[in-house]
Amino acid sequence: MKQILSLLLIVASSAFADNCKDWINNSDNCLYDTTYQRPTFGNTEEYMEEGKSACITYNDKYYTYEDSVILKNGLMVKFLLPRKLCRIIESITTIKIPKSVRVPRYKIDRECCKRQACVGCGQEYIRRELDKCYHGEADLICKQTYYADSTYYKWAYQIKYSDSVKVDFEYSSTKTRVELNPDYFVDGNSIEIYRTDGTLRYRGELTYVPGDLENLPTYKTRGWCYNKAGTKEVRKTNNVGLCK
């Protein structure tokens, strides 16, 4: 499966009213994309072809990948993966543009990329994120329009996708989200875990650890186990599983 290229600026015209880059709500009027250059898959040079599958990932819409997972430190979490929709490319045709246009070009603000870098993340993770940003693959906030292409475009490519869609998820350690057991009481960097009878079982500090190319995101903690009455610290630990 290939992820669809972020397509170029679409002409604001009634002839382009059915264009939807992200297939919002899986609607019938979101089955078309238009680009001034021959469309390719993702950030590759492979050209789209009729009959192939094209996918798009929604990073803000997640599916549960694993639920009720007990980490080595005893915390219970669930992992969520971003939803991915895949459609078949039914046709790629050329269409007349109602009004000739010039396409803007972009440059990357490298200082902006540095400002957007993850605070507290590992150096290797930051290096990879900066590399993506420098190549225009990250947040558009660091892209700046600096001139318009001198070519006047009169024709464009229009891609039509199938109405039927395959709903899947994208496995990626860097895009996966981790959520703590909703029964835990979390306030900023503090966590409290209670027993079924309502007494305090554990209280401590909580640290989020982002995922990287080899590891899923996770949480670390350190604090104190409490006695059965939940009134007294009895054991210092970084393993909630030791608190009974």
Image: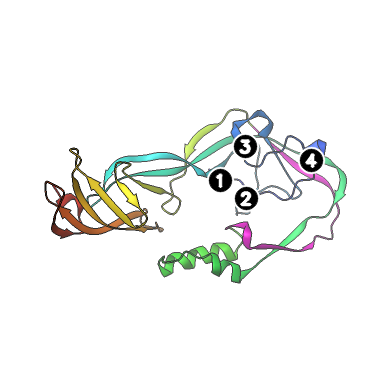
Quickly name the residue at label 3: 23
Residue 66 point in image, percent of width and height? 34, 41
Mark 2: secondary structure: loop
Q: Earlier in the sequence, mark 3 or mark 2?
A: 3
Q: Are marks 3 and 2 in contact (CB under 8 Å)?
A: no
Q: How crowded is mark 2: few (under 14 residues within 10 Å), some or many (20 or more)?
A: few
Mark 1: secondary structure: strand
Q: Residues within 10 Å of mark 3 (few under 14, many from 20)?
A: some
Does the segment drawn in magenta span residue 159? yes
Count of numbered marks: 4
Mark 3: secondary structure: loop
Q: Earlier in the sequence, mark 2 or mark 4?
A: 2
The amino acid type, in three-letter code, at marker 4 is Thr
Identity of the residue drawn at 18% across and 50% down:
241
Residue 64 point in image, percent of width and height? 39, 39
Give the distance between the C-alpha atoms of the residues marked 2 and 4, in whole angstroms: 19 Å
Q: Which mark is residue 94?
A: 4
Give the distance between the C-alpha atoms of the residues marked 1 and 3, in whole angstroms: 16 Å
The amino acid type, in three-letter code, at marker 2 is Glu
Quickly name the residue at label 1: 2
Q: In this view, does 171 lie above or below 147?
A: above
Identity of the residue drawn at 81% across and 39% down:
95
Quadrant in which residue 25 is drawn: top right
Q: Give the range drawn in magenta.
A: 138-161
The amino acid type, in three-letter code, at marker 1 is Lys
2 vs 4, front mark: 4
Q: Are marks 2 and 4 in contact (CB under 8 Å)?
A: no
Mark 4: secondary structure: strand
Residue 154 point in image, percent of width and height? 86, 47
Give the distance between the C-alpha atoms of the residues marked 3 and 4, in whole angstroms: 21 Å
Does the segment drawn in magenta span residue 239? no
Quickly name the residue at label 2: 46
